[in-house]
Image (spheres, grey):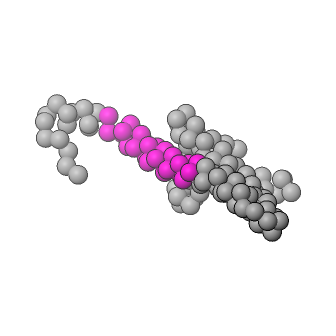
Amino acid sequence: MAYPTKVGSRERNSHHGRLKRVDNSNSRAKRLLEAEFDVIAERLHREAAVPKASLAGGDFLDVAQGIEHQELARLSASRLSERAKRLQIALSRVSEGDYGVCSECGTSIPPQRLRAVPDATTCVACQARLERGAH
Ligand SMILES: [Zn+2]
């Protein structure tokens, strides 16, 4: 992509160059998080609609299967909404400028980890420590 050739805008670009780069990487993370959030919201919406349709069927077996499906849908829906919650936390960290910083120890989270886990709010070491503590 080429820079605008007008002298005025070129001056502005070089003046805010450093700040702009930071904003760009954060807005890319934001877009990534928002896109994943949208997919999860869409899935939650779709899965919430499935059990009702299968329960509408007639005999006992259909109803039993419908309940089983509902149970599965409920389980995955709760996992999905947990994920949605994490994404929302990550998004609020982006807007506060804390994205990519470990919430536990304050060191920056390696970019490879953020690419693999875009909603990560802790570094690998802190995550492992928290998981050990949780059990
Ligand atoms: Zn940490």
Q: Is residue 34 left or right of residue 82?
A: left
Q: Which residues are magenta?
A: 16-42
Q: Give the image location of residue 28, x and y in percent.
A: 44, 48
Where the C terminus falls, by quadrant? bottom right
Does residue 125 show up? no
For image coordinates 63% across by 41% down, the residue present is: 89
From the viewer's perspective, tell me whether residue 7 is left or right of residue 78.
left
Where does residue 133 sit, x and y in percent of width and height?
84, 53
Which secondary structure type mostly characterizes the magenta part of the structure? helix
Observer-nearest of 30 and 66: 66
- Residue 32 appears in the figure: yes
- Return the residue nearer the eye: 18 or 70: 70
Count of number-bearing discs:
0
Side (left or right) of 114 relative to 17: right
The location of residue 94, given as percent across then percent down, is 53, 40
Residue 124 magenta-highlighted = no
| Residue 118 image point, x, y percent | 56, 53
Q: Is residue 80 found left or right of 12 in the rendered image?
A: right
**Residue nearest the observer in this picture, 135 or 105:** 135
